[in-house]
């Protein structure tokens, strides 16, 4: 987020609003140049052995990244984030019942990427499952692709892994919009792109040496033969997971299924129990979520779905325990879907509570105070965006955080604040 950070956030972090020092070449009072020392990331120690992944939405835009306009996921059909609804906090009008602690942001802002990945790491999360709309030039798909690669560019330095959740519905959308004429060819192009760009990355999640690939569905390719054709360009083929109860639509190409969040006349916890208890020969990826409360009806995007009360942190605690009791792989649903109210990243409404629960459940020795170091780094990035010297010191803070030298990170941020 390029806009000046609000006094509210700085006050939360015990900082004052103010400008940064001018360290341009013409300033004769410049201190000697500071050169950060890159440090290797260290794994966070925890007592839980299950792999913990989190589903990330990379689709958020601000006017600075979107041609002067807020992205649709902050405004839907009828909200205007340029409107400040609370002057005391700087809170803007967004299409959500919940508000990010750092305010509405751009997914390609590297300060945001750094903030989110560091919070994940210090919470005990092992990897990120990134919602991916492919390579077709339609709607906001190119921006989403750019945003995904902002995240993948920093994974190795943070020490996290990642995998792709493929939205095959984009193929139908592109056919309907006459952007493509051959859906299989377009999907193969997406596969080739993933194999070249992601699958061979040392940070990409592998299961038994094969790259992990999920699909949100499938919604367009719904036969074993179709997926066999799409995957024919890949070597090796991926470990492929569909949504729960849909693996038959991929046939022998499916390695397993992953749970999501859903409720109809059957309560959501019963859906989870049915998933965990059914006879199934494939692998299962469990689901843990904080609740569900979408904004679609209020935002003018249809009638909406259902409500699963957050009940503080109790829904997250219950679904996380179920997943850990039944699976070795857990997907947290989600990091930041504000439109559906499933976000676990820090918000005004819930603070850090979902992440601190995660730390406690996984046996992570980090605390909320450690998570606040990440927010403090983010605030200092924004408050000192024009200071090259301070940004270099903050680069060093980043390296201290990824190498878990937290006391050194605190001391250096103290130094930056007092300069």
Image (spheres, rainbow, N blue to C red):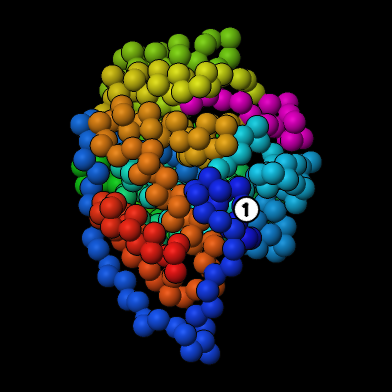
* Magenta-drawn stretch, dominant element (helix, strand or loop): loop
Q: Position of residue 372 (x, y in %)?
A: 42, 45
Tell me if residue 416 can be seen.
Answer: yes
Q: What residue is shown with label 1?
A: 6
Q: Position of residue 136 (x, y in %)?
A: 57, 57
Instruction: Residue at 68% x, 26% y: name it.
Output: 304
Identified at 50% across, 80% down, the residue is: 23
Residue at position x 54%, y 78% in the image: 22
Q: Is residue 60 magenta?
A: no
Q: Quadrant of residue 353?
A: top left
Q: Quadrant of the C terminus?
A: bottom left
- The image position of residue 30, as x and y in percent, is 45, 83
The part of the chain drawn in magenta is 290-304
Mark 1 falls on what kind of element?
loop
Q: Nearer the viewer, residue 331 or 207?
A: 331
Q: Reply above or below: 2 against 139.
A: below
- Which is nearer the eye, 357 or 17? 17
Q: Left or right: where does residue 100 sit relative to residue 328? A: right
Q: Position of residue 60 (x, y in %)?
A: 59, 50
């Amino acid at each position: 987020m390029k806009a000046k950070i609000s006094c509210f956030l700085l006050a939360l972090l015990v900082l004052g609003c103010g400008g940064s020092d001018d360290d341009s070449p013409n300033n004769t009072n410049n201190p000697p140049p500071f050169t950060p020392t890159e440090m290797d990331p260290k794994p966070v120690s925890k007592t839980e052995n299950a792999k913990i992944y989190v589903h990330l939405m990379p689709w958020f835009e601000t006017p600075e990244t979107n041609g002067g306009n807020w992205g649709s996921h902050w405004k839907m059909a009828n909200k205007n984030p340029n409107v400040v609804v609370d002057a005391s906090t700087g809170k803007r009008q967004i299409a959500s019942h919940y508000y990010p602690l750092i305010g509405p942001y751009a997914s390609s802002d590297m300060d945001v990427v750094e903030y989110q990945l560091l919070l994940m790491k210090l919470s005990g999360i092992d990897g990120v499952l990134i919602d991916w709309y492919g390579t077709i030039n339609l709607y906001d798909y190119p921006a989403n692709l750019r945003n995904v690669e902002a995240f993948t560019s920093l994974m190795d330095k943070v020490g996290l892994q990642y995998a792709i959740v493929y939205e095959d519905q984009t193929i139908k959308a592109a056919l309907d919009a006459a952007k493509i004429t051959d859906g299989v060819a377009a999907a193969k192009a997406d596969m080739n792109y993933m194999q070249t760009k992601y699958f061979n990355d040392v940070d990409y999640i592998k299961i038994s040496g094969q790259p992990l690939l999920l699909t949100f569905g499938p919604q367009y390719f719904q036969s074993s033969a179709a997926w066999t054709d799409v995957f024919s360009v890949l070597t090796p083929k991926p470990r492929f997971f569909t949504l729960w109860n849909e693996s038959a639509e991929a046939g022998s190409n499916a390695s397993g299924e992953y749970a999501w969040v859903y409720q109809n006349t059957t309560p959501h916890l019963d859906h989870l129990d049915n998933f965990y208890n059914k006879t199934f020969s494939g692998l299962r990826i469990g689901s843990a979520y904080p609740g569900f409360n979408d904004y679609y009806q209020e935002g003018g995007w249809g009638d909406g779905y259902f409500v699963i009360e957050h009940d503080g942190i109790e829904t997250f605690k219950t679904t996380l325990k179920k997943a850990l009791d039944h699976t070795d792989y857990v997907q947290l649903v989600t990091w930041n879907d504000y439109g559906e109210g499933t976000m676990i990243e820090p918000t005004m409404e819930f603070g850090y509570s979902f992440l601190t629960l995660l730390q406690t459940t996984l046996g992570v020795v980090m605390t909320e105070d450690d998570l606040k170091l990440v927010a403090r780094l983010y605030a200092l990035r924004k408050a000192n965006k024009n200071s090259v010297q301070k940004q270099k010191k903050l680069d060093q803070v980043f390296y201290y955080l990824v190498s878990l030298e937290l006391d050194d990170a605190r001391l250096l941020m103290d130094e930056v604040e007092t300069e």
